[in-house]
Image: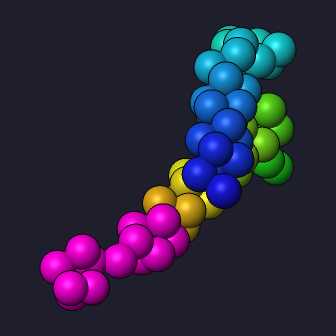
């Protein structure tokens, strides 16, 4: 489970770091529309960044759960005696 979480976190990070195909400029200074704020339907992240963020967070959660499970399963040597 720890390996699966680590792999998912790395894949999510790679997806986040890949360049997206969105333009970084636009017609934001058009005079008749300058008094309104435009927010794209998907938010400020591209779909690629959204997927990368979700995969990265899920990977970290699985990694933390697996690490906690492993730490909880080991027994205390002093109590066994």
Is residue 50 among what the camera can see? no
Quadrant in the picture for the C terminus? bottom left
33 vs 80, left or right, is right
Q: Residue at x 61, y 60 (%)?
A: 62
Residue 16, how many percent across, how many down? 65, 28
The structure's colour scheme is rainbow
Is residue 73 shown above or below 34? below
Quarter occupied by residue 15: top right
Is residue 67 among what the camera can see? yes
Q: Residue at x 64, y 44 (%)?
A: 3
Q: Residue at x 67, y 23 (%)?
A: 14
Span shown in magenta: 68-81
Quarter occupied by residue 79: bottom left
Is residue 9 shown above or below 13? below
Residue 1, how many percent across, how many down? 66, 56
15 vs 64, left or right, is right
Overall secondary structure of the magenta section: helix
In depth, the one of 26 and 21 nearer the eye is: 21
Q: How many marks?
A: 0
In depth, the one of 5 and 48 nearer the eye is: 5
In depth, the one of 60 and 80 nearer the eye is: 80
Residue 79 is covered by the magenta coloring: yes
Residue 67, how many percent across, how many down? 47, 60
Q: Residue at x 71, y 13 (%)?
A: 19
Farthest residue in the left direction?
78
Residue 17 is covered by the magenta coloring: no
Residue 31, how many percent across, how many down? 67, 25
């Amino acid at each position: 489970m720890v390996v699966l979480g680590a792999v998912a976190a790395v894949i999510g990070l790679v997806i986040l770091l890949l360049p997206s195909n969105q333009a970084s400029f636009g017609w934001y200074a058009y005079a008749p529309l300058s008094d309104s704020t435009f927010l794209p339907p998907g938010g400020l992240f591209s779909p690629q960044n959204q997927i990368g963020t979700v995969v990265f967070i899920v990977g970290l959660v699985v990694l933390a759960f697996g690490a906690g499970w492993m730490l909880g399963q080991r027994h205390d040597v002093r109590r066994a005696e």
